[in-house]
Image (cartoon, coloured by chain):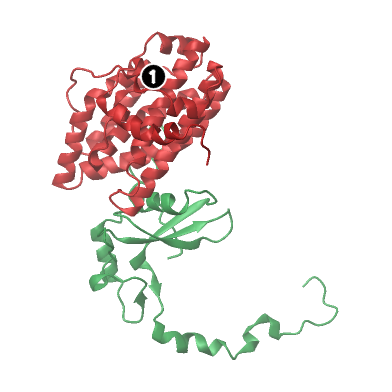
Chain colours: A red, B green
Amino acid sequence: MSDSLFEYLLRLADDRLVLGHRLSEWCGHGPILEEDIALANISLDLIGQATLMLRLAGEVEGKGRNEDVLAYFREAVDFRNVQIVELPNGDYAQTIVRQFLFDVYSYHVLEQLQQSSQLELAGIAAKGFKEVRYHVRHSSEWMLRMGDGTEESHARAQKALDDIWRFTPEMFVADAIDDEMLAAGVGSDLRAIKPKWDSVVTDVVTRATLSIPADAAMIGGGRKGRHTEYLGHMLSEMQIVARSHPGAEW
Amino acid sequence: MAEARDAKGETPTIGGEPAEARQGGATRGEIEARGASGKTSAVDRIAPGENGDAPRGESQWPLWEVFTQKAGGVPHEHAGSVHASDAETALQNARDVYARRGGVVSLWVVPSNEIVASKSEDAGPLFDPGADKIYRHPQFYKIPRGLKGF
C-alpha cells in the first residue's frame, strides 16, 4: 500500500512540478506584462502543489528523502508525469492549449481528491482546487480569445490543438496503481473524469470556433518513466543549481 | 463611475458550477464608442488616448483602472492600472498584478477613459475657495459644555 501510495503521489506531484517549471520559463518573456505575471503566478501555484505532494511522498516512502531531494535528485526515468506537461512551450498558443487541456483534467482530479481517505492528500487537494479553478478560468478565456480572435491566432490555436491532442489520452489511462488507490478511497476515478473532461473541453473548443482533432495513436508512457527527449533537457536546467551546490540553502 | 461592472456571461462552466464572469461587453469598439459619446469640453479624460479613444499602451489594448478593497465594508481604493482587451481579462490581469499576494477581498476594473477628471487649470476656481472658509469645517464650531454623547 505505501509503495503504491508513494508512486501515486509522485504521479500527481511530477505533473505539477514539470508543468510549473515549464511555465516558469515564460518569466520575463510573456507577451505582455500582465500575462507574464499571470503565468508566473500559475507556475508558482503548481510548484507549490508539487512541493506539498512530494513532501508527503517522501514521508510515505520513509527513506528520508524530502521534497527537494525528490525534485532535484531524480533522473528523467524516475519522473512519473504524463508527457503532455513536459512538451516545450512553443508559441503562446501551444502553451495555452497545453495548459487548458491539463487544467481541466487537474480540476476534476483535485476536486475528487478533496474527499480522499488520505487526509493530508485531501488537504493538499482542497488548497490546490481553489487555485486550479482560477487556472481553468484563465486558460479557457485565452482559448476563446485565440480561437475566436484573428485569423492568425485561430490558425495557431488549431495547430497547437492538433499537435498536442494525441498526448491527452495518457492522462486517463488507469493502471493497477490507480485502481488500487481508487479502491482504497485515496485516489481519483480517471474513468469517471474522462467524460467530464470531454464535455468541458468540447464546449470550450467549440465556442472558440476550433475543432477537436480526430483521435490518433496515443502517445504516452510517462507514468512508467518513458518520456520525450524534452524532459531530460528541462531537468538538466531545473536541477543544475541544486546538484552543483548540494545542501545549499537560501 | 462608482459602480463596479458586474461581468457575467457565458464562461466555461465546469463541474456544474454557475458560469463565472466573462466579458462585460466592453469590446474595443464599445469602449471607443463610449469614449466618443461621453466627450464634453468641461472635463478631462484621466488618460486620453488618440482622439479621445480608449488609451492604448504598447500592447495596443485599452487601459483599465484597478480598485481593490482590503476588507468588507471599507472603500475600494485605486491600486493602479492594467492593459486588457476586455472586462474579463482586465479583471484577471488585475487579480494577477494587484491581488496575487492576498489581502484583497474585492476588485473593480473600470475603463480608464470612463473616468472623468477635473482639469488642472480649473484647480483655482474649484478648490481654492475652500481654503479660507473655516466655517466649512466642523472644528470651527464650539461644542457647548455639558453636551454629552456627541
Number of numbered discs visible in the structure rendering = 1
Badge 1 element: helix
Residue at left offset 58%, top offset 59%? B74
Q: Which of B148 and A200 is in front in this view?
A: A200
Residue A102 in picture, x, y percent from top left? 34, 30
Amino acid type shown at disc 1: Asp
Residue B6 in picture, x, y percent from top left? 41, 52
Q: Considering only vertical position in the picture, is B88 above or below B138?
A: above
Question: Is A90 left, or right, of B101 in this rendering?
Answer: left
Tell me if mark 1 has few (under 14), some (14-19) or many (20+) residues whose alpha carbon lies within 10 angstroms of its own: some
Residue at left offset 39%, top offset 44%? A40
Residue projecting furthest to the right: B146
Q: Nearer the viewer, residue B82 or B140?
A: B82
Q: Can see residue B63?
A: yes
Question: Is A85 left, or right, of A1 in this rendering?
Answer: left
Image quarter of the C terminus of chain B? bottom right
Question: Is A228 left, or right, of A118 in this rendering?
Answer: left
Residue at left offset 46%, top offset 30%? A50
Residue at left offset 80%, top offset 70%? B149
Residue A89 in picture, x, y percent from top left? 27, 37
Q: Considering only vertical position in the picture, is B62 above or below A224?
A: below
Q: Considering only vertical position in the picture, is A143 above or below A72?
A: below
Q: Considering only vertical position in the picture, is A188 above or below B62?
A: above
**Badge 1 is on which residue?**
A78
Image quarter of the N terminus of chain B? bottom left
Q: Can see residue B12?
A: no
Q: Which of A155 and B12 is in front in this view?
A: A155
Question: Is A37 left, or right, of A153 in this rendering?
Answer: right
Residue A27 in picture, x, y percent from top left? 35, 46
Chain designation of label 1: A
